[in-house]
Image: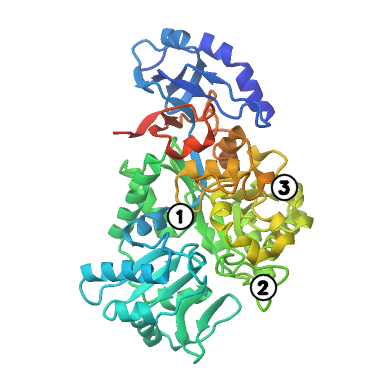
Amino acid sequence: MCAAMKRVWLLLPLVLATCAAPRPEAKLIHNGRIYLGEVHGGGSAWPSVEALLVRDGKVQAAGALAELERLAAGCERVDLRGGVALPGLQDAHGHFEALGAALEAVDLRGCASYGELVGRVRARAAELPEGTWIEGRGWDQNLWSPPEFPHHAELSAATPDHPAILQRVDGHALLANAKAMRLALAHDPRASESVGAGGRVLLDAEGSPTGVFIDAACELVQRVLPPPTREVRERRFLLAQSQLLALGLTAIHDMGIDREGIAILHALYERGELRVRTIAYLSGSATLDATSVRGLPFGTGEDQLLSVVGVKLYADGALGSRGAALLEPYHDDPSHSGLLLLDREALERAVAVCARAGLQPAVHAIGDRANRMVLDAFERQGAIERDFRSLRPRVEHAQVVAREDWERFEALGAIASMQPTHATSDMPWAPARLGPERIVGAYAWRRLASDPARLAFGSDFPVESPDPRLGLYAAVTCARADGTPSGGFLPEQRLTPTEAFAAFTLGAARAARQDDRRGLLLPGYAADLTVFAEDPLAIDPQAWLALPVRLTIVNGTIAYIAP
């Protein structure tokens, strides 16, 4: 914890004794245990209080209920109903609108076979008029036997009259049926060909497209998909928001939003409909320049429900589709080493544009080659601009990192923004992709930060479920929901409960450079709280998976209340 935070904590008794009588808009949050968060650092026990006095959405005082009642006479009261509150849980890496779109699309998660996938899509086609596009998301060929990419033939036979685009679980590959590919081919003849280094079109033995498009090649098909209207986009944001708040999330980092999306969120904020705190990162590319980032609304309102703080860039693809860029070939495919979506020069230019604009670069890097390239770009920019480190440049996922690069994260001031559920989702097949030597640097959050509270944890929703309870459980067990494998997939990476909660609270706020006002429940900090029915720090982590969320409070206002 920084010195300023320590001073605030030490001055708390003085604050309690001297604060003025509250104005009518003050609130007393009470009737439950309230943890203040990672106040002392190092994963130590979290201090707790009986009540919070909140004014203008911020904590004014924290302490004993009797003392605060004396100061809060006549105030509005927020009853925790005997629940246990923590600093509001945050997801440091998600895709806000994409979650809403996924909730409307055909859910393909958990399909145990290609036949099951086809069945789900066939059922949706039966509900839709002929010619209507079908979108789906969530398939993972690693769950099938054999674990191979599909061919479109069976899907096309089941959906001859509906163009279909089905995104893989990681969003870095898609499966298109014949009708969708015909429309794409009519739009651009290249849709049947292999593309450059940033993408692949898989071909069958006859040299025809299998229907699987990877990374940059996805655009060949997606570009013919009718774009959603503004009304549809608003609906998707609001649909996603309802789910996020019900899961106890008070803040999200929206990783890769366009300018229209920012404008939509701003309009929702102006109408009072934005209730989950949104920290936005503009979607960037190799063409990023000063014009691209000019005029962004860096912050909205005193309540800071919406802010634009950085730019999301992509260095490589995903491990599951073998698009992650590796230093050496894949252990289970020696002919392939992955895909770079930005070359070194383009990445360095984009990082420099972000730095000059005062925006955080947040770079997607899965493979060890991509992670090294991103760290090299940060090191180069740091040598050019002395203040670059203060931007806290982010590496999104940091999923496979070579041993030589582990210590570079802290040395360069880079934030490791990681998703614990990726480890538990990938563990059935990740060792085969990477081999026994590289796997020791995969999902290795303890290796990248001496203090796990300095990590930023999220889910990458809708790639994974946005439920933070799943991420917390994965971080402390490295195991499936049933507790297997015994001891965890990567047992040396397991965190303590307070370390895991810190990475979903203060660590996430720190990653957005907002840890001076969010992530703790000290005076001056936002009154964002996640309230559980039981004390998560006093029960077995296995029980977290079914632990009810009782209330979600943002800026001192109840944004969700369990029925």
Spot occupied by residue 351 in the image (x, y as percentages of width and height): 64, 60
Q: How many marks?
A: 3
The quarter of the picture where the N terminus appears is top right
Mark 2 or mark 3: which comes first in sequence?
A: 2
Amino acid at the residue labelled 2: Ser
Which residue is nearer to you in this view: 513 or 328? 328
Between marks 2 and 3, how big is the CA–CA gap? 24 Å
Between marks 1 and 2, how big is the CA–CA gap? 27 Å
The quarter of the picture where the C terminus appears is top left
Q: Which residue is mark 3?
A: 447
| Crowd rating for badge 3 (residues with CA inside 10 Å; few <14, some 14–19, many 20+) | many
| Location of residue 138 with respect to 150 vertically, above or below | above
Which residue is nearer to you in this view: 363 or 320? 320
Q: Which residue is mark 1?
A: 95
| Crowd rating for badge 2 (residues with CA inside 10 Å; few <14, some 14–19, many 20+) | some
| Location of residue 140 with respect to 71 vertically, above or below | below
Q: Is residue 171 visible?
A: yes
What secondary structure is marked by label 2? loop
What secondary structure is marked by label 1? loop
